Amino acid sequence: MVRHTVCFKLKDHSDEAKEKAAEVLLSMVGNVPSIRKIWVGTDFLMSDRSYDLILQVDLDNREALEEYQNDPYHCEQVKPYMHANREASVAVDCEF
């Protein structure tokens, strides 16, 4: 199993912007076949070092991660929105 985790710092830190970004990320459910499980959380602490959102996606293996990264819905709908609205992001991909 592979877990793909991304933390996003948005340009707009408002609750509305966080909720919209979370909706966009969760729209992958049913649209990206390689996803086995998805979880999105929003930050409430809002400290200087906080990121606004976390995305965790579980996939079967490294090949499924590659499929996810190149999936048309992910690339055409989700990535453009997140790239346009993020200030920064960090990612970790691990096997468990």
Image (tube, grey):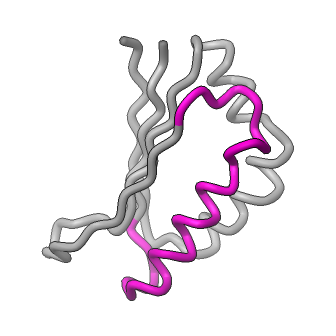
Q: Where does the C terminus fall, quadrant-wise?
A: top left
Residues 56 and 49: in front is: 56
* Residue 45 x %, y %: 15, 73
User: Between 69 and 21, which is closer to the camera in this rendering?
Assistant: 21
In front here: 27 or 10? 27
Number of numbered labels in the structure image: 0
Asked if the stretch drawn in magenta spans residue 90, the answer is no
Residue at the spot 86% in from the left edge and 43% down from the top edge:
72
- Res 26 → quadrant: bottom right
| Direction from residue 4 to residue 24 in the image, left or right | right
Q: Is residue 68 above or below residue 74?
A: above
**How far from the left and from the top, in percent, is residue 47?**
13, 74
Residue 76, percent across and down?
83, 55
Side of 65 relative to 11 (left or right): right
Above or below — where is 8 with respect to 2? below
What residue appears at the point 82 percent right and 48 percent down from the top-left corner?
73
Residue positioned 45% across, 72% down in the render = 87
Region rendered in magenta: 9-37
* Quadrant of residue 35 within the rendered picture: top right
**Residue in the picture at 42% in, 39% down:** 5
Magenta highlight on residue 27: yes
Image x and y of residue 95, in percent: 41, 13
